[in-house]
Image (cartoon, rainbow, N blue to C red):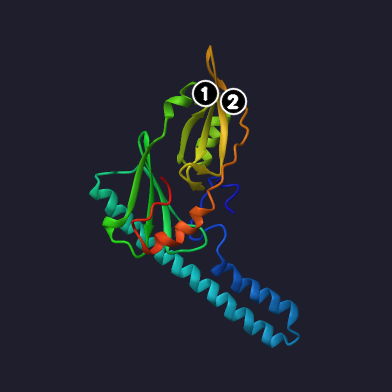
């Protein structure tokens, strides 16, 4: 929308990519416009459905503020001062949120429910393994991935292949966007093929999401 002034990708992360509570009212309004013969009834139905979806969006924005306040307080208790922080709703709801915080060579995966106290916020520390990509860090493809993730990435190795994962989409151990950026050989690390490796969260993790909303002892990722 801001081209040609900037190509910086930005988002507010107010809804998960699929959220039935937001989508179903819009679908009902769309079907009403197709099926209702009375234009007044169709317009009235759409007005109600758009109002419901907009109210839900406003609620999500309010929940995000509430979650961010709790997470920042929890990080301060642990004396963590992140350079980068972002929160997004967990799958299919706006009551549980997953946050990513970056502090130097470490990152934190954070789960927070709107019902949590500050002491209930789950914070897990993981290494970013940045040393794995030092040899290829100047390659345009690697720099492009670093730019696209807004610095929210980690490196990891499997076999002789080195990957960069976008920490924003997925959960720890199952990220959606993983790209092979390096190949370990006897002579050292060479640039990889940039093929994408797909990982998907386990199905039982969806059930754990709903349990975690009300029970802060539930761990979604190990």
Q: Position of residue 51 (x, y in %)?
A: 54, 77
Q: Is residue 173 above or below residue 17?
A: above
- Mark 1–mark 2 contact, CB under 8 Å? yes
Quadrant (top left, top right, bottom left, bottom right) of the C terminus: top left
Q: Is residue 217 left or right of residue 8?
A: left
Point 54% across, 36% down: residue: 145
Label 1 packing within 10 angstroms: few (<14), some (14-19), many (20+):
some
Local secondary structure at mark 2: loop
**Where does residue 5 sit, x and y in percent of width and height?**
56, 47
The residue pinned by badge 2 equals: 192
Residue found at x 46% / y 63%: 94
Which residue is at 73% across, 83% downward? 36
Q: Nearer the viewer, residue 186 or 144?
A: 186
192 horizontally vs 66: left or right: right
Name the residue at 63% across, 79% down: 46
- For label 1, the residue is 136
């Amino acid at each position: 929308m801001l081209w040609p002034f900037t190509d910086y990708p930005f988002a507010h992360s107010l809804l998960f990519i699929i959220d039935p509570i937001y989508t179903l009212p819009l679908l009902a309004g769309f079907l009403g416009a197709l099926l209702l013969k009375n234009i007044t009834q169709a317009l009235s139905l759409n007005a109600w459905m758009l109002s419901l979806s907009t109210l839900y969006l406003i609620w999500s924005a309010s929940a995000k503020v509430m979650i961010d306040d709790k997470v920042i307080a929890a990080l301060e208790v642990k004396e963590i001062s992140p350079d980068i922080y972002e929160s997004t709703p967990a799958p299919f709801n706006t009551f549980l949120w997953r946050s990513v915080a970056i502090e130097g060579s470490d990152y934190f995966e954070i789960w927070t429910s709107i019902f949590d106290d500050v002491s209930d916020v789950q914070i897990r520390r993981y290494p970013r393994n940045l040393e794995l990509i030092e040899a290829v860090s100047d390659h345009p493809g690697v720099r492009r991935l670093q730019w696209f993730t807004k610095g929210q990435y980690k490196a990891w190795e499997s076999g002789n292949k080195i990957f960069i994962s976008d920490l924003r989409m997925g959960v720890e151990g199952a990220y959606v966007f993983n790209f092979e950026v390096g190949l370990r050989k006897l002579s050292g690390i060479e640039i990889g093929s940039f093929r994408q490796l797909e990982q998907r969260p386990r199905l039982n993790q969806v059930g754990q999401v709903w349990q975690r909303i009300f029970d802060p002892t539930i761990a979604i990722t190990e």
